[in-house]
Image (spheres, rainbow, N blue to C red):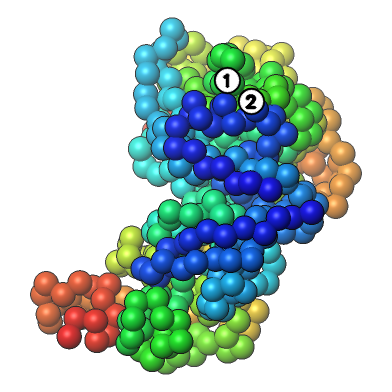
Protein backbone atom coordinates (compact mmCIF):
# COMPACT_ATOMS: atom_id res chain seq x y z
CA UNK A 1 0.00 0.00 0.00
CA UNK A 2 1.47 3.28 -1.05
CA UNK A 3 0.74 6.47 0.79
CA UNK A 4 -0.04 9.74 -0.90
CA UNK A 5 2.22 12.67 -0.18
CA UNK A 6 2.64 16.34 -0.94
CA UNK A 7 5.88 18.17 -1.63
CA UNK A 8 7.32 20.92 -3.75
CA UNK A 9 9.65 20.57 -6.72
CA UNK A 10 11.49 23.31 -8.61
CA UNK A 11 10.81 22.72 -12.29
CA UNK A 12 11.98 25.03 -15.07
CA UNK A 13 12.78 27.74 -12.57
CA UNK A 14 9.46 27.77 -10.76
CA UNK A 15 8.21 26.08 -7.62
CA UNK A 16 5.59 23.44 -8.38
CA UNK A 17 3.40 21.91 -5.68
CA UNK A 18 2.87 18.16 -6.08
CA UNK A 19 -0.23 16.73 -4.41
CA UNK A 20 -1.68 13.27 -4.54
CA UNK A 21 1.44 11.52 -5.80
CA UNK A 22 2.54 8.17 -4.46
CA UNK A 23 5.78 8.25 -2.53
CA UNK A 24 7.32 5.74 -4.94
CA UNK A 25 6.37 7.67 -8.08
CA UNK A 26 9.19 8.42 -10.46
CA UNK A 27 9.96 11.98 -11.42
CA UNK A 28 8.73 11.10 -14.90
CA UNK A 29 5.25 10.23 -13.64
CA UNK A 30 5.05 13.31 -11.46
CA UNK A 31 6.14 15.60 -14.30
CA UNK A 32 3.65 14.11 -16.73
CA UNK A 33 0.68 13.26 -14.53
CA UNK A 34 0.86 15.77 -11.68
CA UNK A 35 2.55 18.81 -13.15
CA UNK A 36 1.18 18.80 -16.69
CA UNK A 37 4.58 18.57 -18.34
CA UNK A 38 4.25 15.78 -20.92
CA UNK A 39 7.43 16.60 -22.85
CA UNK A 40 9.48 13.87 -21.17
CA UNK A 41 8.13 10.66 -22.68
CA UNK A 42 7.39 7.38 -20.97
CA UNK A 43 8.62 4.39 -22.93
CA UNK A 44 10.81 1.84 -21.19
CA UNK A 45 10.83 2.91 -17.52
CA UNK A 46 14.22 1.25 -17.13
CA UNK A 47 16.68 3.85 -18.36
CA UNK A 48 17.24 2.15 -21.70
CA UNK A 49 15.65 4.58 -24.14
CA UNK A 50 16.40 8.13 -22.99
CA UNK A 51 13.00 9.45 -24.06
CA UNK A 52 12.43 10.86 -20.55
CA UNK A 53 15.76 12.72 -20.42
CA UNK A 54 15.72 15.80 -18.17
CA UNK A 55 18.34 17.80 -16.30
CA UNK A 56 18.51 17.50 -12.51
CA UNK A 57 20.86 20.09 -11.01
CA UNK A 58 22.26 20.51 -14.52
CA UNK A 59 23.00 16.79 -14.97
CA UNK A 60 21.42 14.76 -17.77
CA UNK A 61 19.39 11.90 -16.28
CA UNK A 62 16.45 9.65 -17.05
CA UNK A 63 13.42 11.01 -15.18
CA UNK A 64 12.04 7.47 -14.93
CA UNK A 65 14.94 6.48 -12.67
CA UNK A 66 14.61 9.45 -10.32
CA UNK A 67 12.39 9.07 -7.27
CA UNK A 68 10.34 12.27 -7.49
CA UNK A 69 10.21 12.97 -3.78
CA UNK A 70 13.99 12.56 -3.51
CA UNK A 71 14.36 15.37 -6.08
CA UNK A 72 12.91 17.93 -3.65
CA UNK A 73 15.32 20.85 -3.52
CA UNK A 74 16.88 20.03 -6.91
CA UNK A 75 16.75 22.30 -9.93
CA UNK A 76 14.84 20.34 -12.59
CA UNK A 77 14.81 21.34 -16.25
CA UNK A 78 12.54 19.60 -18.74
CA UNK A 79 12.32 20.03 -22.51
CA UNK A 80 9.55 22.56 -21.86
CA UNK A 81 12.00 24.76 -19.99
CA UNK A 82 14.75 24.98 -22.60
CA UNK A 83 13.19 27.67 -24.75
CA UNK A 84 11.89 30.96 -23.39
CA UNK A 85 8.21 30.39 -22.72
CA UNK A 86 7.02 33.84 -23.67
CA UNK A 87 5.12 34.08 -20.40
CA UNK A 88 5.81 33.48 -16.75
CA UNK A 89 8.78 31.18 -16.08
CA UNK A 90 7.62 27.61 -15.91
CA UNK A 91 4.37 28.31 -17.67
CA UNK A 92 4.03 25.08 -19.59
CA UNK A 93 1.02 26.24 -21.56
CA UNK A 94 3.12 28.83 -23.31
CA UNK A 95 6.13 26.64 -23.98
CA UNK A 96 6.60 25.82 -27.61
CA UNK A 97 6.01 29.34 -28.85
CA UNK A 98 9.72 29.70 -29.39
CA UNK A 99 12.10 26.94 -30.42
CA UNK A 100 15.71 26.66 -29.31
CA UNK A 101 18.38 26.38 -31.97
CA UNK A 102 18.51 22.64 -31.32
CA UNK A 103 14.77 22.23 -31.75
CA UNK A 104 14.83 24.34 -34.92
CA UNK A 105 17.70 22.28 -36.34
CA UNK A 106 15.88 19.03 -35.56
CA UNK A 107 12.92 20.31 -37.60
CA UNK A 108 15.02 21.58 -40.48
CA UNK A 109 17.34 18.58 -40.71
CA UNK A 110 14.50 16.06 -40.62
CA UNK A 111 15.50 14.75 -37.22
CA UNK A 112 11.85 14.50 -36.21
CA UNK A 113 9.70 11.73 -37.62
CA UNK A 114 7.21 10.21 -35.19
CA UNK A 115 8.58 12.64 -32.60
CA UNK A 116 8.41 10.39 -29.58
CA UNK A 117 12.15 10.38 -28.92
CA UNK A 118 12.62 14.02 -29.91
CA UNK A 119 12.26 15.70 -26.48
CA UNK A 120 14.85 13.35 -25.00
CA UNK A 121 17.23 13.99 -27.88
CA UNK A 122 16.73 17.74 -27.61
CA UNK A 123 17.60 17.74 -23.90
CA UNK A 124 20.60 15.46 -24.47
CA UNK A 125 21.89 17.58 -27.38
CA UNK A 126 21.58 20.78 -25.32
CA UNK A 127 23.49 19.05 -22.53
CA UNK A 128 26.24 17.88 -24.89
CA UNK A 129 26.74 21.25 -26.59
CA UNK A 130 26.75 23.10 -23.26
CA UNK A 131 29.67 20.93 -22.14
CA UNK A 132 31.40 20.38 -25.50
CA UNK A 133 30.68 23.23 -27.94
CA UNK A 134 32.53 21.64 -30.85
CA UNK A 135 32.18 17.86 -30.49
CA UNK A 136 33.74 15.39 -32.90
CA UNK A 137 31.55 12.78 -34.61
CA UNK A 138 32.41 10.11 -32.03
CA UNK A 139 31.73 12.52 -29.15
CA UNK A 140 28.26 13.12 -30.55
CA UNK A 141 27.54 9.42 -31.02
CA UNK A 142 28.74 8.54 -27.54
CA UNK A 143 26.78 11.41 -25.97
CA UNK A 144 23.57 10.33 -27.72
CA UNK A 145 24.04 6.59 -27.20
CA UNK A 146 21.44 6.62 -24.45
CA UNK A 147 18.69 7.98 -26.69
CA UNK A 148 16.93 5.53 -28.95
CA UNK A 149 15.15 6.50 -32.17
CA UNK A 150 13.29 3.88 -34.18
CA UNK A 151 12.40 6.10 -37.16
CA UNK A 152 15.26 8.19 -38.41
CA UNK A 153 18.21 5.83 -38.38
CA UNK A 154 19.97 8.70 -36.52
CA UNK A 155 21.55 10.27 -39.61
CA UNK A 156 19.17 13.25 -39.62
CA UNK A 157 19.60 13.72 -35.88
CA UNK A 158 23.38 13.78 -36.21
CA UNK A 159 22.96 16.27 -39.06
CA UNK A 160 20.88 18.46 -36.76
CA UNK A 161 23.69 18.49 -34.20
CA UNK A 162 26.17 19.48 -36.92
CA UNK A 163 23.85 22.27 -38.00
CA UNK A 164 23.65 23.70 -34.48
CA UNK A 165 27.42 23.51 -34.03
CA UNK A 166 27.94 25.35 -37.31
CA UNK A 167 25.35 28.01 -36.55
CA UNK A 168 26.63 28.60 -33.03
CA UNK A 169 30.24 28.90 -34.16
CA UNK A 170 29.20 31.39 -36.86
CA UNK A 171 27.18 33.37 -34.31
CA UNK A 172 30.15 33.40 -31.96
CA UNK A 173 32.33 34.84 -34.73
CA UNK A 174 29.88 37.48 -35.93
CA UNK A 175 28.64 38.57 -32.51
CA UNK A 176 31.48 38.21 -30.04
CA UNK A 177 30.33 38.15 -26.44
CA UNK A 178 27.02 36.45 -27.17
CA UNK A 179 26.63 33.21 -25.32
CA UNK A 180 26.87 30.39 -27.87
CA UNK A 181 24.23 28.50 -25.89
CA UNK A 182 21.56 31.16 -26.20
CA UNK A 183 18.49 30.12 -28.08
CA UNK A 184 17.37 32.36 -30.93
CA UNK A 185 15.78 35.49 -29.58
CA UNK A 186 17.18 35.04 -26.09
CA UNK A 187 19.90 37.62 -26.61
CA UNK A 188 17.54 40.27 -27.99
CA UNK B 1 6.04 5.36 2.92
CA UNK B 2 8.40 8.13 3.90
CA UNK B 3 11.32 9.45 1.91
CA UNK B 4 14.20 10.80 3.96
CA UNK B 5 17.07 12.72 2.37
CA UNK B 6 19.34 13.86 5.18
CA UNK B 7 22.34 16.05 4.46
CA UNK B 8 24.49 14.62 7.24
CA UNK B 9 25.83 11.07 7.23
CA UNK B 10 25.24 10.75 10.99
CA UNK B 11 21.55 11.47 10.47
CA UNK B 12 21.37 8.92 7.66
CA UNK B 13 22.92 6.25 9.88
CA UNK B 14 20.53 7.01 12.74
CA UNK B 15 17.57 6.77 10.36
CA UNK B 16 18.82 3.45 9.02
CA UNK B 17 19.48 2.16 12.54
CA UNK B 18 15.94 2.98 13.57
CA UNK B 19 14.54 1.19 10.52
CA UNK B 20 17.04 -1.23 8.96
CA UNK B 21 14.41 -2.30 6.42
CA UNK B 22 14.42 1.21 4.96
CA UNK B 23 15.38 1.02 1.28
CA UNK B 24 18.63 2.84 0.52
CA UNK B 25 18.44 4.87 -2.69
CA UNK B 26 21.74 5.93 -4.26
CA UNK B 27 21.63 6.54 -8.03
CA UNK B 28 18.48 4.49 -8.45
CA UNK B 29 19.45 2.98 -11.79
CA UNK B 30 18.77 -0.54 -10.49
CA UNK B 31 16.32 0.19 -7.69
CA UNK B 32 13.94 2.41 -9.63
CA UNK B 33 13.59 -0.15 -12.42
CA UNK B 34 12.35 -2.62 -9.83
CA UNK B 35 10.04 0.03 -8.34
CA UNK B 36 8.68 1.01 -11.77
CA UNK B 37 7.97 -2.60 -12.64
CA UNK B 38 6.37 -3.37 -9.28
CA UNK B 39 9.07 -5.89 -8.35
CA UNK B 40 10.07 -3.88 -5.31
CA UNK B 41 7.67 -1.88 -3.17
CA UNK B 42 9.74 0.03 -0.66
CA UNK B 43 8.17 0.72 2.69
CA UNK B 44 10.45 3.63 3.46
CA UNK B 45 13.30 5.18 1.52
CA UNK B 46 16.60 6.73 2.56
CA UNK B 47 17.96 8.86 -0.29
CA UNK B 48 21.70 9.52 -0.26
CA UNK B 49 21.38 12.41 -2.71
CA UNK B 50 22.16 15.19 -0.23
CA UNK B 51 25.17 13.52 1.39
CA UNK B 52 27.79 15.63 -0.36
CA UNK B 53 30.66 13.81 1.35
CA UNK B 54 29.69 10.60 -0.43
CA UNK B 55 30.16 12.26 -3.82
CA UNK B 56 33.71 13.42 -3.11
CA UNK B 57 36.98 11.58 -3.69
CA UNK B 58 40.57 12.13 -2.62
CA UNK B 59 44.02 10.53 -2.77
CA UNK B 60 45.61 9.34 0.47
CA UNK B 61 48.97 7.78 1.21
CA UNK B 62 48.35 4.22 2.36
CA UNK B 63 50.68 1.56 3.74
CA UNK B 64 51.49 0.21 0.29
CA UNK B 65 51.39 3.47 -1.68
CA UNK B 66 48.74 5.92 -2.84
CA UNK B 67 45.10 5.00 -2.41
CA UNK B 68 42.13 6.67 -4.07
CA UNK B 69 39.27 7.05 -1.60
CA UNK B 70 36.03 7.21 -3.59
CA UNK B 71 32.88 8.34 -1.84
CA UNK B 72 30.19 5.71 -2.30
CA UNK B 73 28.06 8.07 -4.39
CA UNK B 74 30.81 8.89 -6.91
CA UNK B 75 29.21 8.44 -10.33
CA UNK B 76 30.49 6.48 -13.32
CA UNK B 77 30.86 9.80 -15.15
CA UNK B 78 33.27 10.98 -12.46
CA UNK B 79 35.18 7.67 -12.62
CA UNK B 80 35.73 7.95 -16.36
CA UNK B 81 36.79 11.60 -16.22
CA UNK B 82 40.42 12.47 -16.94
CA UNK B 83 41.55 12.82 -13.32
CA UNK B 84 40.30 9.53 -11.94
CA UNK B 85 40.84 7.47 -15.07
CA UNK B 86 44.44 8.69 -15.02
CA UNK B 87 44.88 7.23 -11.54
CA UNK B 88 42.73 4.13 -12.05
CA UNK B 89 42.66 3.41 -15.80
CA UNK B 90 40.89 0.04 -15.66
CA UNK B 91 38.15 1.50 -13.47
CA UNK B 92 37.75 4.38 -15.92
CA UNK B 93 37.43 1.91 -18.80
CA UNK B 94 34.86 -0.12 -16.87
CA UNK B 95 32.83 2.99 -16.04
CA UNK B 96 32.80 3.99 -19.68
CA UNK B 97 31.15 0.72 -20.67
CA UNK B 98 28.27 1.16 -18.23
CA UNK B 99 24.87 2.10 -19.69
CA UNK B 100 24.44 5.45 -21.36
CA UNK B 101 25.54 8.99 -20.42
CA UNK B 102 22.29 9.32 -18.45
CA UNK B 103 22.97 6.11 -16.53
CA UNK B 104 26.62 6.97 -15.97
CA UNK B 105 25.62 10.38 -14.61
CA UNK B 106 23.27 8.73 -12.14
CA UNK B 107 24.70 5.35 -11.16
CA UNK B 108 27.23 5.14 -8.36
CA UNK B 109 30.13 2.91 -7.41
CA UNK B 110 28.58 2.24 -4.01
CA UNK B 111 25.36 1.23 -5.70
CA UNK B 112 27.20 -1.15 -8.03
CA UNK B 113 28.73 -2.84 -4.96
CA UNK B 114 25.63 -2.88 -2.77
CA UNK B 115 23.52 -4.27 -5.62
CA UNK B 116 26.15 -6.96 -6.00
CA UNK B 117 25.06 -8.18 -9.40
CA UNK B 118 27.52 -10.73 -10.82
CA UNK B 119 27.52 -8.55 -13.97
CA UNK B 120 28.50 -5.36 -12.12
CA UNK B 121 31.22 -3.81 -14.24
CA UNK B 122 33.29 -2.15 -11.52
CA UNK B 123 33.42 -5.28 -9.36
CA UNK B 124 36.20 -7.20 -11.15
CA UNK B 125 38.31 -4.03 -11.33
CA UNK B 126 37.94 -3.32 -7.63
CA UNK B 127 38.86 -6.89 -6.74
CA UNK B 128 41.87 -6.71 -9.10
CA UNK B 129 43.06 -3.60 -7.27
CA UNK B 130 42.59 -5.23 -3.88
CA UNK B 131 40.11 -2.47 -2.99
CA UNK B 132 38.32 -2.27 0.35
CA UNK B 133 34.99 -0.76 1.32
CA UNK B 134 34.40 1.46 4.31
CA UNK B 135 31.14 0.58 6.02
CA UNK B 136 29.39 2.69 8.63
CA UNK B 137 26.43 2.23 10.92
CA UNK B 138 25.12 4.13 13.93
CA UNK B 139 27.24 1.79 16.05
CA UNK B 140 30.60 2.07 14.36
CA UNK B 141 32.69 1.64 11.28
CA UNK B 142 34.58 -1.24 9.69
CA UNK B 143 36.43 -1.96 6.50
CA UNK B 144 36.11 -5.04 4.36
CA UNK B 145 37.89 -6.18 1.21
CA UNK B 146 35.56 -5.92 -1.79
CA UNK B 147 36.21 -9.62 -2.37
CA UNK B 148 34.66 -10.33 1.06
CA UNK B 149 31.78 -7.87 0.66
CA UNK B 150 30.52 -9.84 -2.34
CA UNK B 151 29.00 -13.05 -1.04
CA UNK B 152 26.79 -14.23 -3.91
CA UNK B 153 24.53 -12.99 -6.69
CA UNK B 154 23.02 -9.80 -5.27
CA UNK B 155 24.06 -10.87 -1.78
CA UNK B 156 26.56 -8.82 0.21
CA UNK B 157 28.06 -8.92 3.69
CA UNK B 158 26.39 -5.60 4.55
CA UNK B 159 24.81 -5.86 7.99
CA UNK B 160 21.36 -4.40 8.70
CA UNK B 161 21.69 -0.67 9.32
CA UNK B 162 25.03 -0.51 7.53
CA UNK B 163 25.92 1.78 4.62
CA UNK B 164 28.85 1.69 2.22
CA UNK B 165 30.42 5.13 2.68
CA UNK B 166 33.60 4.82 0.62
CA UNK B 167 35.67 2.55 -1.57
CA UNK B 168 39.41 2.61 -1.01
CA UNK B 169 41.32 1.66 -4.18
CA UNK B 170 45.11 1.21 -4.07
CA UNK B 171 46.80 2.87 -7.04
CA UNK B 172 48.81 0.22 -8.87
CA UNK B 173 52.06 1.34 -10.50
CA UNK B 174 51.47 -0.12 -13.95
CA UNK B 175 48.85 -0.53 -16.64
CA UNK B 176 45.30 -1.71 -16.18
CA UNK B 177 42.82 -3.08 -18.70
CA UNK B 178 39.09 -3.74 -18.66
CA UNK B 179 37.30 -5.69 -21.37
CA UNK B 180 33.62 -6.46 -21.65
CA UNK B 181 31.45 -8.45 -23.99
CA UNK B 182 27.78 -7.64 -24.41
CA UNK B 183 25.27 -8.17 -27.15
CA UNK B 184 26.30 -4.83 -28.64
CA UNK B 185 28.72 -2.00 -27.91
CA UNK B 186 26.57 0.47 -25.98
CA UNK B 187 23.92 0.18 -23.27
CA UNK B 188 24.51 -3.43 -22.37
CA UNK B 189 24.85 -5.52 -19.27
CA UNK B 190 27.98 -7.64 -19.43
CA UNK B 191 27.73 -11.14 -20.83
CA UNK B 192 31.21 -11.43 -19.39
CA UNK B 193 33.92 -8.98 -18.40
CA UNK B 194 37.56 -9.06 -17.41
CA UNK B 195 39.84 -6.74 -15.46
CA UNK B 196 43.61 -7.03 -15.46
CA UNK B 197 46.02 -4.91 -13.42
CA UNK B 198 49.79 -5.16 -13.77
CA UNK B 199 52.02 -4.01 -10.91
CA UNK B 200 55.37 -3.28 -12.51
CA UNK B 201 57.07 -2.55 -9.17
CA UNK B 202 56.08 -5.75 -7.39
CA UNK B 203 56.12 -7.64 -10.69
CA UNK B 204 52.71 -9.16 -10.14
CA UNK B 205 49.46 -9.13 -12.00
CA UNK B 206 45.86 -9.74 -11.09
CA UNK B 207 43.15 -10.84 -13.48
CA UNK B 208 39.52 -10.91 -12.36
CA UNK B 209 36.56 -12.17 -14.36
CA UNK B 210 32.99 -10.95 -13.98
CA UNK B 211 29.59 -12.37 -14.90
CA UNK B 212 31.03 -15.89 -15.02
CA UNK B 213 30.34 -16.91 -11.43
CA UNK B 214 28.30 -15.87 -8.41
CA UNK B 215 31.07 -13.42 -7.45
CA UNK B 216 34.17 -12.14 -9.31
CA UNK B 217 36.52 -14.99 -10.24
CA UNK B 218 40.30 -15.04 -9.77
CA UNK B 219 42.94 -17.69 -10.36
CA UNK B 220 45.95 -16.62 -8.27
CA UNK B 221 47.93 -19.63 -9.47
CA UNK B 222 47.48 -18.60 -13.12
CA UNK B 223 48.50 -15.04 -12.22
CA UNK B 224 51.73 -16.24 -10.57
CA UNK B 225 52.37 -18.63 -13.45
CA UNK B 226 52.12 -15.82 -16.00
CA UNK B 227 54.06 -13.29 -13.91
CA UNK B 228 56.95 -15.73 -13.69
CA UNK B 229 57.08 -15.96 -17.49
CA UNK B 230 57.10 -12.26 -18.32
CA UNK B 231 60.22 -10.28 -19.20
CA UNK B 232 59.91 -7.61 -16.50
CA UNK B 233 63.42 -6.25 -17.11
CA UNK B 234 63.44 -6.11 -20.88
CA UNK B 235 59.72 -5.68 -21.57
CA UNK B 236 59.81 -7.95 -24.61
CA UNK B 237 56.35 -9.13 -25.71
CA UNK B 238 55.19 -12.24 -23.88
CA UNK B 239 55.55 -15.58 -25.62
CA UNK B 240 52.27 -16.16 -27.51
CA UNK B 241 52.07 -19.63 -26.01
CA UNK B 242 52.15 -18.09 -22.53
CA UNK B 243 49.40 -15.61 -23.43
CA UNK B 244 47.27 -18.38 -24.91
CA UNK B 245 47.74 -20.64 -21.93
CA UNK B 246 46.95 -17.79 -19.56
CA UNK B 247 43.60 -17.36 -21.33
CA UNK B 248 42.93 -21.11 -21.16
CA UNK B 249 43.68 -21.16 -17.43
CA UNK B 250 41.33 -18.26 -16.71
CA UNK B 251 38.61 -19.82 -18.84
CA UNK B 252 38.98 -23.02 -16.84
CA UNK B 253 38.69 -21.07 -13.57
CA UNK B 254 35.40 -19.45 -14.62
CA UNK B 255 32.11 -20.90 -13.39
CA UNK B 256 29.56 -19.50 -15.83
CA UNK B 257 25.91 -20.44 -16.17
CA UNK B 258 23.46 -20.47 -19.07
CA UNK B 259 21.01 -17.59 -18.92
CA UNK B 260 19.00 -15.31 -21.19
CA UNK B 261 22.10 -13.31 -22.12
CA UNK B 262 24.47 -16.11 -23.13
CA UNK B 263 25.36 -19.75 -22.68
CA UNK B 264 27.94 -20.96 -20.21
CA UNK B 265 30.08 -22.30 -23.07
CA UNK B 266 30.11 -18.94 -24.80
CA UNK B 267 31.02 -17.14 -21.60
CA UNK B 268 33.86 -19.57 -20.85
CA UNK B 269 35.26 -19.04 -24.33
CA UNK B 270 34.80 -15.27 -24.09
CA UNK B 271 36.67 -14.82 -20.81
CA UNK B 272 39.57 -16.84 -22.17
CA UNK B 273 39.82 -14.51 -25.16
CA UNK B 274 39.46 -11.42 -22.97
CA UNK B 275 42.12 -12.55 -20.48
CA UNK B 276 44.50 -13.17 -23.38
CA UNK B 277 43.83 -9.78 -24.92
CA UNK B 278 44.00 -7.99 -21.57
CA UNK B 279 47.45 -9.43 -20.83
CA UNK B 280 48.83 -8.60 -24.28
CA UNK B 281 47.39 -5.07 -24.24
CA UNK B 282 48.46 -4.28 -20.69
CA UNK B 283 51.96 -5.49 -21.43
CA UNK B 284 52.16 -3.41 -24.59
CA UNK B 285 50.91 -0.34 -22.69
CA UNK B 286 53.25 -0.87 -19.75
CA UNK B 287 56.52 -2.80 -19.60
CA UNK B 288 56.59 -3.37 -23.36
CA UNK B 289 55.74 0.19 -24.37
CA UNK B 290 57.52 1.27 -27.52
CA UNK B 291 58.56 -2.26 -28.37
CA UNK B 292 57.42 -4.56 -31.10
CA UNK B 293 54.12 -5.74 -29.75
CA UNK B 294 54.28 -9.07 -31.50
CA UNK B 295 51.25 -10.65 -33.03
CA UNK B 296 47.81 -9.33 -32.29
CA UNK B 297 46.26 -11.31 -29.47
Residue at 79%, 54% (x, y): give it.
A1
* Above or below A68: residue B119: above
Query: How far from the left and from the top, in percent, is residue B132?
Result: 56, 19
Residue at 57%, 85% (x, y): give it.
A115
Of mark 2 and mark 1, the one earlier in the sequence is 2
Quadrant showing the C terminus of chain B: top right
* Above or below B181: residue B286: above
* Above or below A161: residue B127: above
Chain ID for label 1? B
Give SS at disc 1: loop
Outermost residue toward the top in this view: B63
Query: How far from the left and from the top, in percent, is residue B80?
Result: 45, 43
Query: How far from the left and from the top, in percent, is residue A45?
Result: 68, 64
Residue B248, image quadrant: top right
Contact between labelled residues 1 and 2, with CB atoms less than 8 Å apart: yes
- Can residue B269 be spotted in the picture? no
Residue B179, image quadrant: top right
Residue at 41%, 66% (x, y): give it.
A15
Q: Nearer the viewer, residue A108 or A181?
A: A181
Q: CA distance from mark 2 to mark 1?
A: 6 Å
- Can residue B170 be spotted in the picture? yes
- Whether residue B65 sits left or right of residue A42 in the image: it is left
Q: Nearer the viewer, residue B135 or A20?
A: A20
Please give the residue where the numbered disc 1 appears in the rendered image: B138
**Disc 1 residue crowd, few under 14, some 14–19, many 20+, Cα 10 Å:** some
Chain ID for label 2? B
Query: How far from the left and from the top, in percent, is residue B70?
Result: 46, 30
Please give the residue where the numbered disc 2 appears in the rendered image: B17
Q: Nearer the viewer, residue B15 or B89?
A: B15
Amino acid sequence: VSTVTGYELVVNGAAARVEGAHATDSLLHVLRDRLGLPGAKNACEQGECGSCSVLVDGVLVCACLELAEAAVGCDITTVEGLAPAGGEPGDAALAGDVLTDVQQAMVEAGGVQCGFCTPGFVVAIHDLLARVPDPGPLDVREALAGNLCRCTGYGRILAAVDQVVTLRSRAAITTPGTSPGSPPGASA
Amino acid sequence: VTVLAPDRLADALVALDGDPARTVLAGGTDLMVDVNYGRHRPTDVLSLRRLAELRAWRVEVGPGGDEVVLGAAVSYTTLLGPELSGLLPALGQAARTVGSPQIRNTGTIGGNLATGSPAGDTLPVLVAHGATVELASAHGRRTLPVADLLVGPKVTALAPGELITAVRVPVVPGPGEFLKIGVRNAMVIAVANCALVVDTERRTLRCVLGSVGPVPVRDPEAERWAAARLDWDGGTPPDPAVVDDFGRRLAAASRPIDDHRATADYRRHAVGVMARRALARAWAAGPGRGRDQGRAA
